[in-house]
Amino acid sequence: MARFYFNLREGNDLLLDPEGCVLPDLAAVADKAMRAARAMLSADVLEGRMSLDMRLDVADENGIVIHSLAFPQAIEIVRPR
Amino acid sequence: MFLWAGEHYKRGVKRANLARIDARAAEIEPPGPRWWSMIEKALLKLKARDIVSEAEEEILRGVIARTEEVRADKVVVRAGEELTVSILLLDGLMCRYRDLRSGERQIMELHVPGDFLDLHSFLLKRLDHNVMALVPSRIAIAPHPRLAAVTESHPHLTRMLWLTTLIDAAIHREWLVSLGRRSAIARIAHFFCEMQARLAVVELADDTGFPLAITQTDLAECVGLTAVHVNRTLRELREAGLAVFRGGRVDILDYPGLKRIAEFDPEYLQIERRPR
């Protein structure tokens, strides 16, 4: 178990996770990041705007980024043929 | 002062205690003078809805068998277990919640001092949800036979207790609207407005804000969002000059604005003194 901080980047903007989250392993980190990205994207779509210029940089207690998820990787986009 | 609290991932993982509050081991308190003011918050809650006579106050005090201190994260009622007592929250914060296999948790109601956490267990005997402490809390135990005696001898006090379970139901309906229909910012704004109104009744909030020693993850589990989304939405509320949630406190910067974005109408909380 360790504490991880899910910091959100949008363009040049960085929103720090103030309290972090205790998770068992990297798989749990990746899973949580994926669910967070999808949840936020879907909420944004309901508002009529979806920014794919976002990324979750998950840092450990030393501030080292140990997992990164760019939002386009969180969804499959099917374009009209 | 950001790392003030921990969080759980799944049930059973201990949360770091909130540093501001002194955590004590569970202990049973002997009867004494403190009992006199013990149910003060519950009385404030009832007296905001109707007149409570001195005789009724005494009867309500007599319903309490003992008090206990509970640590943060302690589950005080488990879904499905047979219950013989109901629990009144004297101090702290507790919640009704359900966990899913995925580790996701939904909090259905946040309880403030003066709330009967599981008065419904008096008749239901088994609950369909758990109840746990979010911070170190103090509870009073009301054995069901004593509650039964109240219903047989004091019809008005019985109706007042019934009313509190109806208010819980109204809160659930309002949360249902939030979870089903409100935007992220409106959900959190509504939650803050409700907490302000309920805590003000028990003299724990004023127009400028209130202490709320929960984590962003707890908040996320109340409003059905992820913690990351809550963090971003809290920034929106800050930048819009509406409210700031930081360091275990909610500061309300623009109450009319917060109410407007939440479409908050406190009518459902029945904060009105009238014959019941």
Image: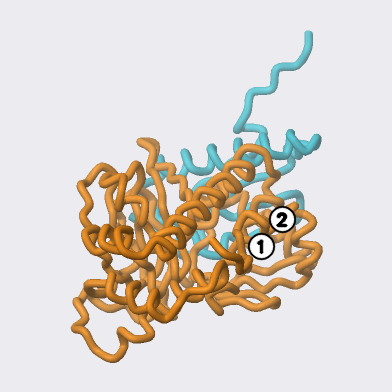
Find numbered disc 1 in the image and state the secondary structure of the residue it sits on: helix
The crowding category of the residue bearing disc 2, from other C-alpha atoms within 10 Å (few below 14, some 14 to 19, many at least 20), is some
User: Of the residues under marks 1 and 2, which one precedes in the sequence?
Assistant: 1
Q: Is residue B274 above or below residue A23?
A: below
Q: Type of residue at label 2?
A: Phe
Q: Is residue B191 left or right of residue B99?
A: right
Q: Position of residue B146 (x, y in %)?
A: 24, 64
Q: Position of residue B23 (x, y in %)?
A: 32, 77
Question: Where does label 2 land, which residue?
Answer: B264
Q: Residue at x 49, y 69 (%)?
A: B46
Q: Are marks 1 and 2 in contact (CB under 8 Å)?
A: yes
Q: Residue at x 62, y 71 (%)?
A: B250
Outermost residue toward the top in this view: A81
Residue B268 lies in quadrant = bottom right
Question: Where does label 1 land, which residue?
Answer: B193
Q: Nearer the viewer, residue B192 or B247?
A: B192
Specify the chain shown as orange: B
Please identify which colour was used for chain A in the image.
Answer: cyan
Q: Chain of mark 1?
A: B
